[in-house]
Image (cartoon, rainbow, N blue to C red):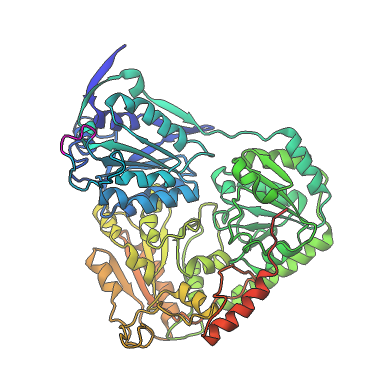
Amino acid sequence: MATKRMTVGQAIIEFLGHQYTVDGDVRVRTIAGTYGIFGHGNVAGIGQALLQYSIDEPELMPYHQARNEQGMVHESIAYARMTRRMSTYANAASVGPGATNMLTGAAVATTNRLPVLLLPSDTFANRAPDPVLQQLEMPHDASLTVNDAFKPLSRFFDRIQRPEQVFSAMLSAMRVLTDPVETGAVTVCVPEDVQAEVIDVPLEWLADREWHIRRPRAERSALEAAAKTIRAAKKPLIVAGGGVVYSNAHDALRALVEKTGIPVGASQAGVGSLNWDHPQYLGSVGATGTFAANRAAHDADVVIGIGTRYSDFTTASRSAFQNKDVTFVNINVASFDAFKHGSTHAVVGDARESITELIDLLDGYTVDGGYQQSYAKDLAEWHSVVDAAFVDQKRDLPSQTEIIGAVQAATDPRDVLVCAAGSLPGDLHKLWRVRDPLGYHVEYAFSTMGYEIAGGIGVARADTTRDSVVMVGDGSYLMLNSEIVSAVAEGIKFIVVLIQNHGYASIGHLSEDLGSQRYGTLYRTHDKSANTFSTGDRLPIDLATNAESLGMDVIRIDTTPNAIADLSAAVKTAKANPRATLIHINSDPLLYSPSGEGWWDVPVAAVSTVPSTQQARAAYEKAIAKQRPLLG
């Protein structure tokens, strides 16, 4: 067998450069490139390999420099989502804080079912220098390192203790990365001495390899049973999740609902399943849903979940579906999700393939005209409410809703809206009028403060024909803004709309609803005697200058009645600018978006000496009475 003599680090990089994902007639690199922050654990291993190939074979493995390990994983995740899970990045870091900085990213990837490859260095396999710098010593387990923390966060985990283990480890990694059921964070730890060791690698292992995305068809009997149940429904509702987007089932879903008249409500990941103005699209559903979708959910007799994992926000903490005879049909490529909540019909199969077969099985079935008129009336009412909420009220401090409306109006249909945490995801879920299948990119499975800027860069890297528009609050901006430098270094154009509200607006609102009076959520000086941040002066924070110092072009929106008009003009200016641009605007965090009649279960203290908490507890006890123990 022909072989090539190389280090383990070189073998990994050359192997990754020859992996391809195939879906139908689409063939792309599985690993589009490698992010890396090199420390003593990988500078002479993975780092040396990247250097060598940049000289010998520059196209083999593009390298991108990052400023924070968590940020580079977020960029990779965003890229993976924009490519519908067909392509992602490898992420190399040194053992110790470099590796553990990637833990949050691993959790984001696995929770969102998005592929990302993590290559943290590890302590010496030969234990010659023991303990080595950054080694975690545990007296009861000499084999334990900080990288073991990745195990509960990864869909696949391995540690290459001997050079010859690289073959099976990397093949297994690729299998999981390209499997729509198994995918998530894949972690392969490589001890720093092993990275630099020599091995004879079979050329067959280094050759181009294709990984075909599986689109499994569901069992015919399961689809027929589901179709029979749907045919008997008077008020069915489809809950579209991320599986619709990832399987590119938009056209199939559109054909199904236009043929049957069944309305659709979307989860956060499912926004984009249909465009906002489609007559069967009722908008978002659940805790942050529209009242059009939530009213349909309340009365639905058959709920058809397609590619959704039914998070607590999607089900409004199991309070959304109130029909006592409701039946659930769950279509999902993963049996874990298809069988959730005691579903009556679990259809395990690809979303696109399953919908296509359902169209034929439901031939001749349409929902009653009265039902169509009812949800159309609610939808028209909701659109009117949003139209009114978007109107510029000429306030010095506009509402977040007005800001969203201005950004919406100034962007193009193919632009990608990026967000993750705070009050913005809830408002965007029900207010953003998506006009493209990939136009809405909100990381809400883990709702990670700090994802936004890194995610926006990943989106921009994935598709340069669209503008990546990040909307972020000051809280999330402060969590992780360092990747701005990475974008500036590579000349990546993206737009950030930074909403300054001097605190944690989302938790402040929630805290107030739960009787905790926004405690600990305001950016103010500390009153030590009262042990509070609620009464001090506002902090003299200037985040616009911070972004400017990191190399971004900055547009400041003055606090005047023209703020919204100025914001609209600024977005258009930023879109015309070839450089990365941040727009800074102040808002009033006490002006809330329209209610979608959803609810979210956050327990309130059962006993308290605080009157506001007592009142909140009474309201909470009324709300939990609507929860259903099971869905189906």
Is 126 colored magenta in this rendering?
yes
Q: In which quarter of the image is the N terminus?
A: top left
* Residue 612 x/y as whole percent: 54, 85
- Residue drawn where x is 20% and y is 28% of the image: 197
Residue 252 can be seen in this image:
no
Dominant secondary structure, magenta: loop
**Left or right: 399 in relation to 261:** left
* Residue 52 x/y as whole percent: 19, 33
* Residue 584 x/y as whole percent: 35, 73
- Residue drawn where x is 51% and y is 52% of the image: 438
- Residue drawn where x is 28% and y is 76% of the image: 542
Image height of 411 relative to 151, above or below = below
What's the magenta region?
A: 125-129
**Left or right: 216 in relation to 193:** right
Viewer-closest of 128 and 511: 128
Image height of 241 relative to 475, above or below = above
Is 157 colored magenta in this rendering?
no
Residue ranking furthest to the front: 140
Asked where in the image residue 420 lies, by quadrant, the reply is bottom left
**Left or right: 143 in relation to 221:** left
Asked where in the image residue 487 lies, by quadrant, the reply is bottom left
* Residue 241 x/y as whole percent: 59, 52
